[in-house]
Amino acid sequence: MLKRVPGPERRVVRTRAIDDLAQGAVPAFWDRLAAAGSPIVERGGADRGCVIATFCWRDPEGDERGSSTRHVYLDANGITDRSRPERAGLSRLPGTDLWSLSIEVPENWRGAYRIIPRTEPLTIPCDGTPGWQWWRNVLAGAQPDPFNPLPTRAVQAGDCSEAVMPAAPAQRWWTDRPGRGELHETTFTLSGTPRSVWVYEPPGLAAGSRPVVVLLDGRTWAVDLPIAGAVDALGPAGHRVPLVVMVDSVGPALRSEELGCSPAFAAGLTGELLPWLRRDWAVTDDPASTIVAGCSLGGLTACHLALTASHVFGCAVSLSGSFWWPGSGPGVALQDRIRAAAPSRSRFGIEVGTLEWMLFEPNREVRDLLAGTGHDVRYREFCGGHDALHWRDGLIAGVASMLGYAPVMQ
């Protein structure tokens, strides 16, 4: 069962960036923010390894006399706790259009964030509405930060801005450049459900016996955060280059069913998708060069497949795997399957964010169980939350690790 762990206790602080402002200085402040970019980052956090980040929102209706906005909230991945929205409320500078929140964050944090202006306060529903549904409705009114200089990202139920703190590690693989290969979209009936499947052929791909990576939640990587340009970097870096197959999850209900270790979905991947790829796309039948990769529930399913269908998928890449599953519902937990499984030649790449306060302990448990039963495990933690802005780079890093380097021709 998933154990509810309290969210982060982030300290809201006063900062000179806002405290020194008077009403008459606010127009000049907006000009400086437009030039410097948001959020404002200052040293001086009380906790070692932290900085102070100030997030601002400009009320388009002006000051409190003419505005209908009475509450503004920050939603920052891994930083704010959605179960306690009152702790992430911005404050208005009286008589102005400026709302702000200054909060301590790790100096190596990278994450998605957005601003939520409202007329009514955010309150947790008591009418039985599922938490995810309530939050999705809340996010319908969220906005990216117009003062952030980085591109807006269409991830996690809406447009987000990206915050990068001064000590955040650079992302080696991610790029916004489009892929130089060919992307094909087709409709494929998998486990009885017609769905989109995207196949990307990067430059430098072998003509036959092609390594292959199957990406779950494929629309994210084909459409929302196109990953083709990052895949292109594998060849020039000396790595083997795979065919990339991105499988659509269709919708939330089917996704929860299929990526909850569904036997029917597993059978569809191993008995329908892979034979088609071997026949029509010349992919290998070598499990050591056949990767399944996913995030969240997709990470759970990737590891489940490499454990239970290792004759097909010999490699799994999991980002923020939902190893709490099945919670209080029916099903056999992955941890119990690992304990009962014999060692195999499957290899596992597992990453999780240290700010994922509900997931990092289950991910460490899965790492230890896999290693303790003789499996090959490569494990990493990053300073972030349940966030596609980390997964986009970690997926390619995991694939590179699984495939290794191409042989050097003499």
Image (spheres, helix red, strand yellow):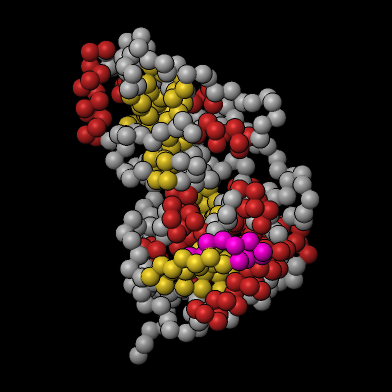
Where residue 25 appears, as percent x and y from the top left, is: 23, 16
Q: Residue at x 43, y 84 (%)?
A: 207
**Residue 338, picture quadrant:** bottom right
Q: Nearer the viewer, residue 54 or 354?
A: 54
The mark total stands at 0
Is 52 in front, or is 152?
152
Residue 122 x, y percent position in the rendering: 54, 23
Q: Position of residue 350 (x, y in %)?
A: 57, 59
- Mark yes or no: residue 109 visible: no
Residue at 69% in and 26% down = 127
- Quarter of the image with the N terminus is top right
Q: Quick check: 390 above or below 198?
A: above
Residue at image position (74%, 55%) is 333
| Magenta span includes 196 | yes
Q: Residue furthest bottom?
A: 410
Where 218 falls versus 355 (above or below)?
A: below
* Residue at 26% in and 30% down: 33
246 with respect to 313 (left or right): left
Please provide the residue range marked out in magenta: 189-198
Whether residue 26 sits left or right of residue 346 in the image: it is left
What x and y, as percent, mark residue 214? Answer: 54, 67
Please determine whether, in this image, residue 110 is positioned above or below residue 85. Answer: below
For this rendering, which residue is in front, 260 or 302? 260
Assign the C terminus to one quadrant of the image: bottom left
Corner quadrant of residue 227: bottom left
Q: Is residue 64 visible?
A: yes
- As for residue 215 lying within the magenta part, the answer is no
What's the magenta bit mostly, secondary-structure-wise?
A: strand
Using the image as rendered, state which of residue 65 and residue 74 is in the foreground.
Answer: 65
